[in-house]
Image: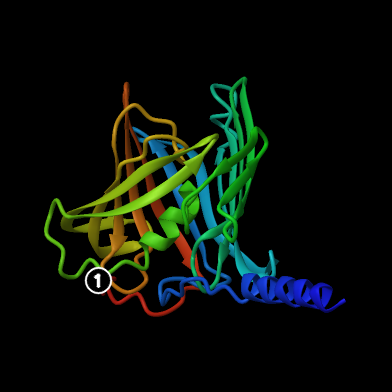
């Protein structure tokens, strides 16, 4: 009987240790629940679509507080007869650690469709997907969560060419995702004129835009680092996404030129 009690005690200690495991904590002054960013998606001089990034709400998932973050891209009605797009990405981002617990991708582009989802068991180090279960490193990202954590990085002491390293899980494996700093530039869009920093995510797989070239993102040069412009080079030109409206920001846009 005494041995049985010892085994039970040991099991309880292991369970207690498991659930008291500490996750990383990252200071986040860049975004909060209720943020909504809207963009015109342009091909040349033509507005082909509308994109929206939003921190919808805060909820519980895997016993943790998470942000429900969405990214949607839809072609405008006038463009639909040529090529219809209805894309949606979602991530459930840990409020304290800014790593994902769940990711969803729903692509509708012309006749091409794809649906992918993954639950990230950040405690045990596994991603459970629509295609199987795979090992993941601690704090692994999906492509959408990687963008939001990049907004919390400190670029103030960086020089052009310096980079941050992230890891991005997609489909069935982990890919390197480096974010390169390219300097500063003033950008004018419909939402205003902003002093920006320029970054380039080296997306290997699972990007928000399918492309055959690089992606340059202009982020406001302040604590919020909201995206002002995204240029995606493709085989037959480039696609530009430009900020048209914003609401629910976590603070003041000090980079906006009065």
The local secondary structure at tag 1 comes to loop
Q: Residue furthest front?
A: 2
Nearer-the-camera pick, 129 or 228 = 129
Q: Position of residue 241 (x, y in %)?
A: 39, 45
Q: Would residue 61 appear left or right of 246 to someone viewing this image? A: right
Q: Residue at x 58, y 70 (%)?
A: 34
* Rendering quarter of residue 232: top left
Q: Position of residue 112 (x, y in %)?
A: 60, 22
The C terminus - image quarter: bottom left
Nearer-the-camera pick, 83 or 46 = 83
The N terminus - image quarter: bottom right
Number of numbered discs overlaid on the protein picture: 1
Q: Residue at x 42, y 55 (%)?
A: 147
Q: Position of residue 32 (x, y in %)?
A: 52, 73
Q: Is residue 236 above or below residue 233?
A: above
Q: Position of residue 165 (x, y in %)?
A: 30, 53
Nearer-the-camera pick, 199 or 82 = 199
Q: Residue at x 25, y 71 (%)?
A: 257
Q: Would residue 173 appear left or right of 101 to someone viewing this image? A: left
Nearer-the-camera pick, 243 or 70 = 70
Q: Residue furthest left?
A: 159
* Rendering quarter of residue 44: top left
Query: Which residue, given by chain and number where applicable, does mark 1 sit on?
Result: 257
């Amino acid at each position: 009987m005494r041995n049985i009690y010892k085994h039970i005690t040991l099991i309880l200690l292991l369970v207690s240790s498991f659930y008291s495991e500490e996750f990383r904590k990252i200071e986040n002054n860049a975004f909060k629940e209720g943020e909504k960013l809207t963009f015109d998606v342009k091909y040349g001089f033509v507005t082909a679509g509308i994109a929206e990034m939003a921190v919808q709400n805060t909820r519980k998932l895997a016993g943790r507080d998470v942000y429900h973050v969405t990214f949607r891209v839809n072609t405008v009605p006038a463009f639909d007869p040529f090529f219809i797009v209805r894309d949606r990405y979602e991530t459930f981002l840990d409020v304290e650690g800014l790593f994902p617990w769940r990711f969803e991708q729903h692509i509708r582009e012309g006749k091409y469709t794809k649906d992918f989802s993954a639950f990230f068991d950040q405690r045990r180090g596994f991603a459970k997907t629509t295609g199987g279960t795979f090992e993941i490193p601690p704090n692994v990202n999906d492509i959408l969560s990687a963008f939001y954590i990049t907004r919390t990085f400190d670029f103030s002491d960086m020089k052009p060419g310096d980079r941050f390293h992230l890891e991005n899980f997609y489909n069935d494996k982990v890919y390197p995702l480096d974010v390169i700093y390219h300097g500063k530039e003033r950008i004018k869009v419909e939402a205003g004129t902003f002093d920006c920093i320029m970054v380039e995510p080296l997306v290997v797989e699972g990007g928000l835009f399918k492309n055959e070239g690089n992606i340059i993102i202009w982020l406001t040069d302040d604590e919020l680092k909201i995206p002002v412009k995204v240029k995606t080079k493709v085989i037959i030109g480039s696609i530009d996404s430009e900020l048209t409206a914003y609401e629910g920001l976590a603070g003041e846009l000090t980079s906006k030129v009065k």
